[in-house]
Image: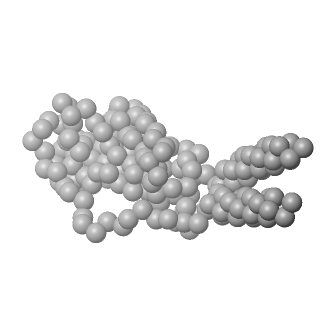
Amino acid sequence: MRNWKRTSLIVISLFALLFITAAAYAQQERGSIRGAVYQDVNGDGRCVETGIAGEVPVEGITIEFVSSDGETVQTLYTGSNGTYGLVAVGQSYWEVTAKPDPTKWIVTSTNPLFAPVFPENGLVQTGYNFCVAKGANAIIVLPESGAPAAQQTGSLLLIATAVFGIFLFTMGAGLELARRRS
C-alpha cells in the first residue's frame, strides 16, 4: 500500500512539473530580431544608408542566433534584399553573428551584435545590421570594450520551478516524518 502512495505522488508531481513548465513556456511573450547585410566598399564599418555608390544589400550571408543560455541556436540567410528576420523568438539576450563565406567576404562592422529580447527592452529588435567587404584586405572594426554582459531576468519558469521544488521538499519531509512516526 505504501509503494502505491509513493508511486502516485511521484507520478502526480511529474505531471504537475510538466504542466507548470508548459504553462510558463506558453505564456512567455515572443519577439523578433531583424536586420540587414550590406556591402562595405570602403571598409569603414559603415554601410547602411551612407550614400556611397556600391554599398548595396548582400544576399546569402549566414546569420547565426544564439540564446544567452547557449541552448538555442538558429541559422538564417539574408534574402535577395539583404535582410533577415528571426520571428517568434523567445525572451533572451541573443547573440547575433554574421558568418559570411571567408573566401568571399569579411565582416567590417561590429560582430557579433547582442539583441535583448525582453518586454522591458522591447520584444521587436530591429536595426541589427552588418557590413561586409569583398576579399581578405578589409579594415575590421573591433567591438568596444565594456560591452554589457548578458541580462538576467526572473522568469515565470524559474519561479514555477522554485515553487515546485519547495513543494517536493515539503512533501518529502512530510513523508519522512510520517514514516518515522509509524
Q: Quadrant of residue 102?
A: top left
* Residue 52 at least partly seen: no
What residue is drawn where x is 28% and y is 69%? 146
Q: Quadrant of residue 149?
A: bottom left
In the image, residue 86 lies at what x, y percent? Answer: 50, 43
Q: Nearer the viewer, residue 43 or 102?
A: 102
In the image, residue 113 lies at what x, y percent? Answer: 35, 54
Residue 138 as seen in the image, left or right of residue 65: left
In the image, residue 132 lies at what x, y percent? Answer: 24, 43
What residue is drawn where x is 24% and y is 59%? 143
In the image, residue 155 lies at what x, y percent? Answer: 61, 62
What residue is drawn where x is 45% and y is 41%? 73
Counting the numbered discs, the total is 0
* Residue 76 at least partly seen: yes
Residue 86 as seen in the image, left or right of residue 80: right
What residue is drawn where x is 84% and y is 64%? 181
Q: Nearer the viewer, residue 76 or 181?
A: 181
Which quadrant does the C terminus fall into? bottom right
Q: Quadrant of residue 141?
A: bottom left
Q: Report the coloring of the rendering.
A: one colour
Which quadrant does the N terminus fall into? top right
Residue 87 as seen in the image, left or right of residue 34: right
Q: Nearer the viewer, residue 182 or 128?
A: 182
Q: In the displayed image of the protein, which residue is found farthest to the right?
A: 1
